Image (tube, rainbow, N blue to C red):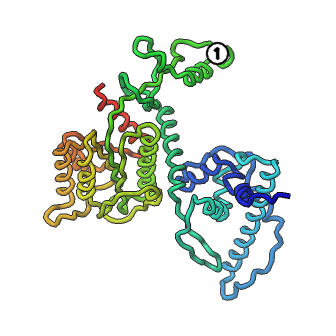
Amino acid sequence: MKPECKLCVENIESLSSLFGRDVTEQILYGLFNPKGFSSQDPEIDINELVKSHIDRIQDEKAGGLDGYSGWMRRYLKWYEKLKTARKMAWEELLDKIKTGQMEPDSLSVRQMMRHFSDILAEELQKEGFLEQVSEKYVYQNSYVFYSLTARSEKIIAKKVLEEAFLRLKRYGVGLHEIRESGWGVYPSHILREYDEYGHTYDMLDIQETLLSTASRDPREMRMERHDFKARIPLHKAKSSNIILIDKSGSMNGNKIRGAIMAALALRQLMETEFKDDILQVIAYDQTPYLLNPGDLIKLRANGWTDIGKALDLSRELLIREDENRNIFLITDSEPTVSCYPNQTPEASALRASYMLSLEDISINIIMLDRRPELRALCEEMAILNRNATAVYVDDPLNLSEFVIKSYIDMKLSSSGN
């Protein structure tokens, strides 16, 4: 009898093969953005499953607890009991999935992460989605810390872009509302109602037309004039872009996460639809540096803020390009340090903005704080650059939609329409 292929056996037992690609990608996205977990009620309540196992576990005397206080001994005994119950629940779920008694999508990813985070992390590491960065021991327990890899970054980027387009469409502020782009050869996400005088038949999007009809008249599917949708092509006007992400200490929490999501979404959009365009991502505190694939997802907030030096590095990179050149500057504060001894941090930022104007490089200043002094600085930078915009975003997790829409607006205006 021919032995079973070892590679096939390993693949069958992998997390992504058992739970499927969608669930695996939801787990990865949830690790990056905890607010990205679905809030729908699951068919299987893992909380209740774990509790049922806890109730069946007999209390046992835990060894090696001498020297701990009474409450600590009780806590450690309870924690060991909880770990055992979670392991039993995990094995029960795996058995039901393997035997077809349960579908993976009937489980809550949020609950899975709550109860099986260490198990999931180990499995994701085996598949190259996570890498171990450190390990600590606390009260006889080992805690392993992981970071997402470049492979995970690509998956998360797709998820971020998909969500950004869904939100743009839901709130009615999406790409389908920006002005007509004219004739071109580049297909895009931009949808308009079909106009027999302004559009050609090859621009008709059959799928979107049928979806519009089905949502209005699912029984008869009788098409009306406003059901017909056209997908608008864009001109292939090459652009060179840089996203500057402030990673100073104040950019913690959702601020740095939102900035990362914006960069991931824009890069994914360019890689899928605007392949001739260039995007470079620079993180900066007191020192700016280029991010390589896989670095963006690991970015953490720390350090001071030198906007002038970050803009100078961007100028050095963009003057080598001869097409439309743009900078997206994401920050939440005024500059706090300057690498130039004879210039204050504010003066350095203003000088750098003016130097960009001499090279015809535009700045899109995205400020995550509405303090009057910051508004004044942004407006002065915009005036000196002569081709700049300054906007204020209250929710950092909306940055991806704003950056995408700004980029598409720029593409349309550069096409001469």
Q: Amino acid at mark 1?
A: Met
Q: Quadrant of the C terminus?
A: top left
Spot occupied by residue 83 in the image (x, y as percentages of width and height): 72, 68
Spot occupied by residue 396 in the image (x, y as percentages of width and height): 42, 48
Viewer-closest of 234 and 41: 234
Name which quarter of the figure residue 175 lies in.
Answer: top left
Q: Is residue 164 visible to the viewer in this orientation of the structure?
A: yes
Q: Is residue 255 placed above or below 277 in the rendered structure?
A: below
Name which quarter of the figure residue 122 lies in.
Answer: bottom right
Q: Residue at x 77, y 61 (%)?
A: 91
Q: Residue at x 69, y 17 (%)?
A: 219
Q: Is residue 384 visible to the viewer in this orientation of the structure?
A: no
Q: Is residue 136 placed above or below 129 in the rendered structure?
A: below
Q: Is residue 51 placed above or below 172 in the rendered structure?
A: below
Spot occupied by residue 366 in the image (x, y as percentages of width and height): 33, 46
Number of labels in the image equals: 1
Viewer-closest of 74 and 1: 1
Q: Is 297 left, or right, of 118 in this rendering?
A: left
Q: Is 171 left, or right, of 236 in this rendering?
A: right
> Which residue in the structure is indicated by mark 1?
221
Q: Residue at x 68, y 61 (%)?
A: 116
Quick one: which residue is furthest to the right in this view?
Answer: 1
Q: Quadrant of the N terminus?
A: bottom right
Q: Is 391 left, or right, of 72 in this rendering?
A: left
Spot occupied by residue 118 in the image (x, y as percentages of width and height): 64, 65
Quick one: which residue is furthest to the front in this view?
Answer: 1
Q: Residues within 10 Å of mark 1 (few under 14, many from 20)?
A: some
